[in-house]
Amino acid sequence: MSSGTEKDEVKDTTEEHSANSDDTSRPDSMSKDEAIKFYETKGLDLSPDVPTKPKPIPEFEKSMADKISSKFGDAIHIDYIRSDRIRVTTKRENIVDVAKFIRDELRYDHAESVSGVDYPDSREIEVVYHLGSYTDEKLGRQIFALATRVPREDIPNPGSDTTRMPSLRDVFYSVEFHERECFEMFGVYFEGHPDMRRLLLPEDWADIPPFRKDFKIKGR
């Protein structure tokens, strides 16, 4: 939700930076989106979830983001670029191709985790793969977050509804158990996964996936 306070914070932040810059072309007042675009052109990160003081975008991480942007263009969105961190969002139909590029061209060789985020208001569930590398020393501290969203059914029927996406198990072998956990906890079915059984819950679990925000523990 936009507010006057939010806009004032952006203005204060950008004015602080301008005091140390020779550039005087910045408008006196900008919305947050306008400020983000303005400072991106100058190599500064002012993403919505970044602290108010803008920081220079790291060159190494930016070079990695530029490679994937050059390959996929509008099929991906660079959510942020920070020290040791890059996050990219793509549509579920593109995620296998994007993941293969990250593995083969950027040299991230494994998934460290797979997370789910429930967005009941927008009727979506986000799936985020956190990728790393054991084989490339330059990537030793790097985490590449690859995210997508799938439809969220109000009355879930995991495995038989539209809450599904392609599995990345054939791209990153280490997702095998992570995707199974995401399936049982959020109800996201991973097409092409060789063993899409429950991992922690009993096979006869009859309630909705327990990590969804509308899950209620019976009797409480």
Image (cartoon, helix red, strand yellow):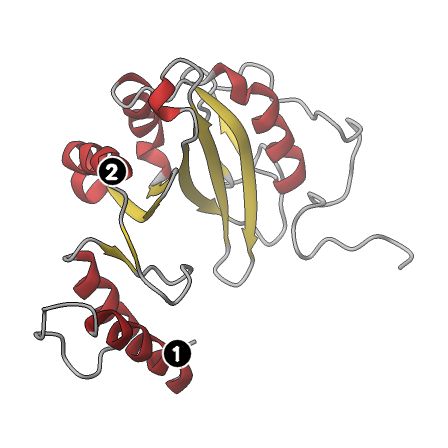
Q: Nearer the viewer, residue 15 or 2?
A: 15
Placement of 138 over or under 185, stated as above or below: above
For the C terminus, the image quarter is bottom right
Image-based side of 175 in relation to 17, left or right? right
Residues at marks 2 and 1 touching, judged by CB atoms closer than 8 Å: no
Query: For this rendering, which residue is in front, 107 or 25?
Result: 25
Mark on residue 6?
1
Q: Residue 127 at what x, y percent from top left?
A: 49, 40
- Please state if 62 lies on the left or on the right of 158 as rendered: left
Badge 1: how crowded within 10 Å, few (<14), some, or many (20+)?
few
Q: In terms of secondary structure, where does tag 1 sit?
A: helix
Of residues 131 and 16, which is closer to you in this image?
16
The answer to whether residue 168 is above or below residue 45 is: above
Residue at 39%, 78% (x, y): give it.
6
Residue lying at 20% horizontally and 57% vertically, measured from the top left: 40
Circle 1: residue type:
Glu
Q: Which of the 4 quarters of the picture holds residue 189?
A: top right
In the rendered image, which residue does mark 2 sit on? 65
Q: Which quadrant of the figure contains the N terminus?
A: bottom left
Location of residue 90 with respect to 140 vertically, above or below: below
Q: Identify which residue is drawn at 31% across, 25% down.
A: 102
**Farthest residue toward the front?**
20
For the question of whether residue 135 can be seen, the reply is: yes
In the picture as drawn, the residue positioned furthest to the right comes out as: 219
Secondary structure beneath dot 2 equals helix
Mark 2: amino acid: Ala
Residue 25's x, y, as percent?
A: 8, 74
Instruction: Choose the circle earlier in sequence order: 2 or 1.
Output: 1
Toward which corner of the image does residue 89 lie, by quadrant?
Answer: top left
